[in-house]
Structure formats: C-alpha cells, structure tokens
Image (cartoon, grey):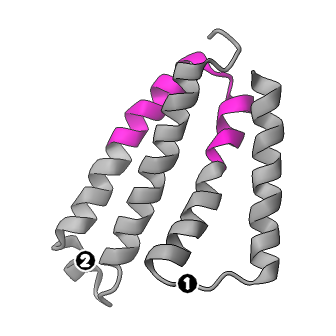
Amino acid sequence: MTGSLTLPMLGLILFCVVAETAREVCFKQSASENAPLKALAKPVTWLGILLWAVELFTWTAVLEHVPLTIAFPLMAMSYVVIVLAGAVIFKENINLRHATGVFLVTAGVVCVGVTGL
C-alpha cells in the first residue's frame, strides 16, 4: 500500500461511487413489485447484481493501494449521488434537513479528500 491517494485510485473510487449508485437505482427500479421473486425475474435486478460484482473487484483493487481511512470516507460520496439520483430519477422529495445532511457529508468527503492528496 502506497499510503496516498493517486489520481488513478481516485478514478477507481469515483467508478465505485457511480457503480454503487447505478446498482441502487437498479434495485429500486426492480423493487416496484411487491413480491421479491418477481423482482428476481427482472433484468434490471440482474444488472444491479452485475454492478455489485464489478464494484466488489474494483473496490478490492482500491483497497490494495489506498488506506481504508481515506478510501472509505470518499465512498461516502455515494450517499450524496444516490440521494440526487433518487430525486432526479424517482422524483423523491429532498427537504431542507435532508439537504443539510447531504451537504455535511459532502463537506466531510472534501476534508478527507484534501487530507489524502
């Protein structure tokens, strides 16, 4: 482990954030049916599972080179991106308290990201 965040590793972390967001959107889309077995029959569910597997291998590669104390907080960007995806794709409501929490998570991620460079 090099102990620092390089640009290629930051790129892989951002890929993990995007993959995690896409996975959650796929699972939310497939969860529209009440029965879990019906959800398993949907291709979007399997796309989410595929994204999970790709993210797993990518995340493992990140952890080989970046300290967990830097990599994991940067993955918290997924919380922000998933909230935004929910608002844009599923028209979910974001109230002021929710937006404040998202802002605070973003501020924390920025602090960690600057520390790791």
Measure the alpha-carbon separation of dots 2 and 1. Answer: 21 Å
Image location (x, y in percent) of residue 111: 84, 39
Q: Residue at x 80, y 81 (%)?
A: 96
Q: Residue at x 32, y 90 (%)?
A: 34
**Three-letter residue code for mark 1:** Glu
Would residue 61 be counted in the magenta stretch? yes
Q: Are marks 2 and 1 in contact (CB under 8 Å)?
A: no
Decide which of 62, 12 is in the foreground and name it. 12
What range of the chain is rendered magenta? 54-76
Decide which of 64, 102 is in the foreground and name it. 102
Helix, strand or loop for disc 1: loop
Residues packed near mark 1 inside 10 Å, few (<14), some (14 to 19) or many (20 plus):
few
Label 2 vs label 1, nearer the camera: 1
Decide which of 5, 50 is in the foreground and name it. 5
**Residue occupying the far bottom of the picture:** 34
Answer above or below: position of 105 versus 60. below
Would residue 2 be counted in the magenta stretch? no
Q: Residue at x 17, y 66 (%)?
A: 43
**Three-letter residue code for mark 2:** Ala
**Mark 2 — residue?**
39
Helix, strand or loop for disc 2: helix
**Residue occupying the far top of the picture:** 2
Which numbered disc covers residue 92? 1
| Prevailing secondary structure class for the magenta stretch in the rendered image | helix
Which numbered disc covers residue 15? none
